[in-house]
């Protein structure tokens, strides 16, 4: 039985890592769905959000230096959310507005630039040292699971999984059932047609970047609580790429399922195949899997079917 | 096709000039569209017909001239202002939301009529939900009117060309437009589809009193359904009048037969 418990633990810990990937991937999907832009800056947005949140909470931050007090967690999170909305607005005003009707690759390049600007800004404003982020999410193993099932699972990871589930449900309803959601999908499909039915592109882009900024905040909180707020956080963005290739760039559920598959897959590979080839599979397994998908199912598991008329 | 001579002017374009770099797409074009009429814009390829529609709904911004819509004069329209002001359109190359169903596509046409705030929509309760249901009802009327009940849930990317054109018309109609712009609504259709489309256009005009401006190459259709016609050639207006007047106009005949311009 000991072996089975171990396998179960590997799978569950993979699932939990997968949820973390999925949270980052979710932010990508939102922007890609609504504007066809692959937002390279998504990971940096998560980092930036976590840095800003830390700043509100800590006594060595700007906020404390200026106002002489720190914010409680329940106020700091909405305040950071507000910062992400303002950031979205600024990005629309200073970057996106001038790129309407440009090629997607040009927009992509713009987001690479944006990533560096944001990273530099984060460094200048908040410093580049690793910051512990504690917003009161319970840490350590879940005693209940350990006692009853002899399973070792981090409470933080359970919390992250729950949060991700709630986010997905809310976003799915938002996209499928509301006017703004429909307008977002309309913009994604055809800019001109969307304009002709009275959708204002400027507004839609601010909304979608805001929403994905808030998703980035959630991802930033989870990753920051897990391993501290550090600049390597922006590299997680790269892991989101295979997740997206698996799940499909335009699918919210796809981001989640893709994240889970990658998370579990790389953990299992590390544990069971790793010893045979000298380990460190975890770092490249995701990309191999993505490559296989690109060969056989380029639209991903849940992506929109590519319908071609000839 | 009521008596148009007395009715008021809905839209007036005055001395519009539009160029892209050195290419003059429109040169000093003026005409008006009266409330309730079917107004056709015709001309050989490259005459500037589509450019004219794009100016009216704000995709293109003319360098010179003014557009007076519902008594309000402006240098240029902006697309979402035009839509909010009741101008809906279809496109020469169908511009539908390919990933969405017929129903969702037509629902987007209701965009300008829906007003509940983002807050309510995000919660998806109360007023926003009632609003969705209300508009869904209207959309069902449009679907019945265009006889496309059977493809309600089909992703439009899978529909044949003729039906896509019809869905696109449906999306425009869902906006309950004051002015409907149709860019070659019958291009690429067979005879039967053309007859259906002509019927829908005329019924829209009759039943809802919608003013229609359309571009069409099929002269038979144009002569049948238009109240008045304006003819463009090389970006200039060369003739205007009832179908009968235009048909017998020597400049128009020359333009279509390709007499050299010297």
Image (cartoon, rainbow, N blue to C red):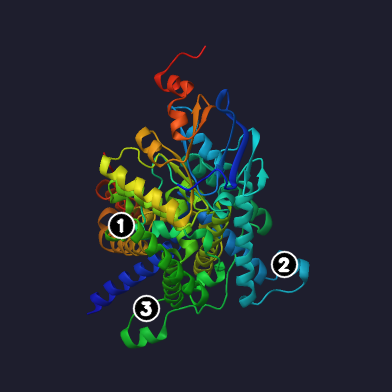
Q: Are marks 1 and 2 on the same chain?
A: no
For the question of whether residue A285 can be seen, the reply is no
Assign the C terminus of chain A to one quadrant of the image.
top left
User: At which x and y percent is residue A176?
Assistant: 41, 65
Left or right, residue A5 beside residue B49: left
Confirm whether circles 3 and 2 share one chain. yes
The quadrant where residue B118 appears: bottom right
Whether pointer 1 and pointer 2 mark residues with C-beta atoms closer than 8 Å, the reply is no
For label 1, the residue is B148
Q: Are marks 1 and 3 in contact (CB under 8 Å)?
A: no
- Asked which secondary structure carries label 1, the reply is loop
| Callout 3: SS | loop
Label 2 resides on the chain identified as A
Q: Is residue A13 left or right of residue B61?
A: left
Q: Residues within 10 Å of mark 1 (few under 14, many from 20)?
A: some
Residue on which disc 2 sits: A63
CA separation, marks 1 and 2? 59 Å
Q: Chain of mark 3?
A: A
Q: Which chain is mark 1 on?
A: B
Query: Hey, which residue is sitting farthest top in the picture?
Result: B262
Residue found at x 27% / y 77%: A5
Report the side of B122 relative to B30 (left or right).
Answer: left
Q: Secondary structure at mark 2?
A: helix
The answer to whether residue A182 is above or below residue B196 is: below
The dot on residue A152 is 3
The mark that comes first in sequence, 3 or 2, is: 2
In this rendering, the answer to whether B82 lies above or below B240 is below
Q: Residue at x 26, y 44 (%)?
A: B192
User: Which residue is nearer to you in this view: B153 or B146?
Assistant: B146
* Foreground tag (1 vs 2): 1
Q: Which numbered tag is attached to residue B188?
A: none
């Amino acid at each position: 039985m000991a072996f089975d418990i171990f396998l179960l633990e590997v799978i569950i810990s993979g699932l939990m890592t997968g949820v973390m990937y999925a949270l980052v991937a979710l932010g990508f999907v939102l922007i890609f769905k609504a504007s066809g832009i692959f937002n390279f800056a998504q990971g940096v947005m998560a980092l930036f959000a976590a840095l800003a949140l830390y700043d509100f909470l800590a006594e060595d931050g700007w906020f404390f230096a200026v106002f002489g007090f720190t914010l409680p967690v329940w106020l700091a999170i909405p305040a950071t959310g507000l910062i992400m909305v303002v950031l979205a607005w600024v990005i629309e005003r200073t970057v996106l507005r001038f790129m309407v009707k440009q090629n997607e690759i040009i927009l992509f390049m713009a987001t690479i630039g944006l990533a560096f600007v944001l990273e530099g800004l984060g460094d200048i404003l908040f410093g580049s040292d690793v910051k512990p982020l504690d917003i009161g999410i319970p840490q350590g193993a879940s005693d209940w699971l350990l006692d009853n099932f002899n399973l070792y699972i981090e409470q933080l990871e359970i919390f992250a999984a729950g949060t991700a589930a709630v986010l997905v449900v809310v976003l799915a309803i938002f996209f499928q059932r509301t006017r703004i959601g429909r307008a977002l999908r309309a913009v994604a499909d055809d800019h001109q047609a969307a304009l002709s039915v009275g959708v204002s592109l400027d507004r839609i882009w601010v909304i979608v970047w805001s929403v994905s900024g808030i998703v980035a905040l959630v991802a930033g909180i989870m990753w920051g609580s897990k391993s501290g707020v550090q600049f390597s956080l922006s590299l997680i963005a790269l892991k989101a790429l295979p997740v997206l290739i698996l799940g499909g760039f335009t699918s919210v559920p796809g981001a989640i399922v893709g994240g889970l598959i990658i998370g579990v897959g790389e953990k299992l590979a590390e544990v069971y195949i790793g010893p045979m080839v000298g380990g460190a599979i975890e770092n490249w397994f995701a990309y191999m899997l993505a490559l296989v998908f690109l060969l056989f199912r380029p639209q991903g598991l849940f992506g929109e079917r590519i319908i071609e008329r000839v | 096709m009521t008596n148009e001579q007395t009715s008021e002017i809905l839209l007036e374009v005055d001395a519009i000039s539009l160029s892209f770099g050195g290419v003059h797409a429109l040169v000093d074009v003026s005409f008006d569209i009266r409330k309730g009429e079917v107004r056709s814009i015709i001309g050989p390829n490259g005459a500037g017909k589509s450019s004219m529609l794009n100016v009216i709904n704000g995709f293109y911004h003319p360098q010179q001239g003014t557009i007076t819509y519902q008594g309000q004069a402006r240098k240029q329209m902006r697309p979402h202002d035009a839509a909010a002001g009741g101008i809906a359109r279809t496109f020469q190359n169908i511009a539908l939301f390919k990933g969405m169903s017929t129903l969702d596509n037509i629902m987007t046409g209701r965009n300008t009529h829906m007003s509940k705030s983002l807050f309510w929509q995000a919660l998806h309760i109360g007023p926003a939900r009632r609003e969705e249901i209300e508009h869904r009802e209207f959309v069902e009327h449009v679907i019945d009117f265009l006889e496309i009940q059977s493809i309600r849930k089909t992703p439009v990317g899978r529909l044949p060309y003729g039906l896509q054109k019809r869905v696109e018309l449906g999306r425009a109609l869902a906006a309950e437009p004051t002015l409907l712009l149709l860019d070659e609504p019958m291009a690429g259709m067979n005879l039967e589809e053309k007859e259906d489309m002509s019927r829908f256009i005329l019924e829209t005009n009759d039943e809802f009193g919608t003013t229609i401006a359309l571009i069409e190459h099929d002269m038979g259709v144009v002569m049948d359904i238009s109240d008045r016609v304006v003819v463009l050639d090389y970006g200039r207006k060369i003739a205007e009048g009832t179908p009968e007047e235009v048909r017998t106009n020597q400049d128009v005949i020359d333009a279509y037969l390709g007499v050299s311009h010297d």
